[in-house]
Image (cartoon, helix red, strand yellow):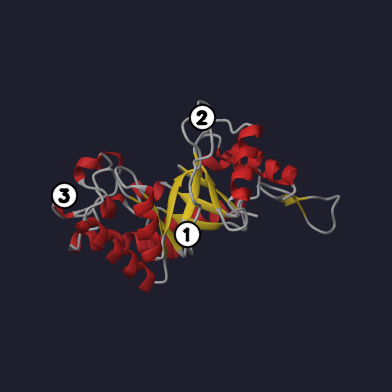
Amino acid sequence: MPRLGVILQDEHALRAARPARPDPSDEAGDEAGDPVELVVLRSTLLNPPRAAAARALAEQVRSVHPNAVLVPYVWHLVSHAASDGLREAGTRTLPGEARRFGHLQDTPEVQSAWDASLRCAKEMGADTVILRTPPSFTPGTVNQARLAAFAEARAAEGLHVVWELDGLWEPAATLALARKLSIDTLVPAFEGTGRPVQQTYEHRWLRIDAAGATERLRGALAESLVFALANADALEDTTILFSGARAHANLRSFARALDAAEL
């Protein structure tokens, strides 16, 4: 079965979860909670917490999803330029010229920003990070080389990179690059119409923000994705992440579709 997880905007999104609780009527185990195996922390894109706060956040997540693996986003000072619009949204900063941050540049400023992300990941016990790049990170030779250097350096640190890209990158080119660099990409699971995106699922994690014009993943749409994965022989090893206000509810809908399909 696929690995299921949620992308949390912040810790308040945990209120929508159904944690596992002791069931007095069942001597063998607990009352089932949400089948969450991964929790992705998007708040670290803006402000990676310092050591004590990172440990506290990890404990809070695991109090709700005790078996989940935590996956933080990389700080935007590593990936985004000043013109990409995230600097104003964050509260944590580093000294240095604005132009020397972002776009995976080989500068002391970017290295300092990565060091902060690395400390955060270690405190959370993470072995995977998500690198989000903006449309301004275009698919030219320079940026491909920067991405390769970043992936190689993270592998040397024992971290796997999942790349969430935006902009002009073509699917075939990103798949070839993912194969070459031994990274995964995070891509939408549905088209704007609500149909599963026609694609190979190799080196691709799927993100479900909504399904067509609604944030609710209706049963028929969940079933369509289940069978699309089954037909592509990708049901066993695909990672699917649910985000947005209905992340946990949509995860439950998909889990029910999996159970009903009996594949």
Q: Position of residue 179 (x, y in %)?
A: 40, 63
Secondary structure under the numbered disc 1 in the rendered image? helix
Residue 144 visible, this angle: yes
Secondary structure under the numbered disc 3 in the rendered image? helix
Marks 1,3: beta carbons within 8 A:
no
Marks 1,2: beta carbons within 8 A:
no
Comparing labels 1 and 2, the label whose residue is closer to the camera: 2
The amino acid type, in three-letter code, at marker 1 is Arg
The amino acid type, in three-letter code, at marker 3 is Ala
Q: Is residue 199 above or below residue 210?
A: below
The label shown at residue 55 is 1
Marks 3,2: beta carbons within 8 A:
no
Residue 56 visible, this angle: no
Secondary structure under the numbered disc 2 in the rendered image? loop
Comparing labels 3 and 2, the label whose residue is closer to the camera: 2
The amino acid type, in three-letter code, at marker 2 is Gly
Left or right of 58? Residue 20 is right
**What distance separates the C-alpha of mark 3 from that of mark 2?**
38 Å
Name the image quarter holding the N terminus: bottom right
The label shown at residue 98 is 3
Q: Position of residue 182 (x, y in %)?
A: 41, 65
Residue named by callout 2: 212
- Residue at the location (56% across, 35% down)? 246
Mark 2 Cα within 10 Å, few/some/many (few <14, many 20+)?
some
**What distance separates the C-alpha of mark 1 from that of mark 3?**
29 Å
Given residues 72 and 60, the one toward you in this image is: 72
Q: Is residue 193 above or below residue 20?
A: above
Left or right of 57? Residue 156 is left
Q: Is residue 145 above or below residue 229?
A: below
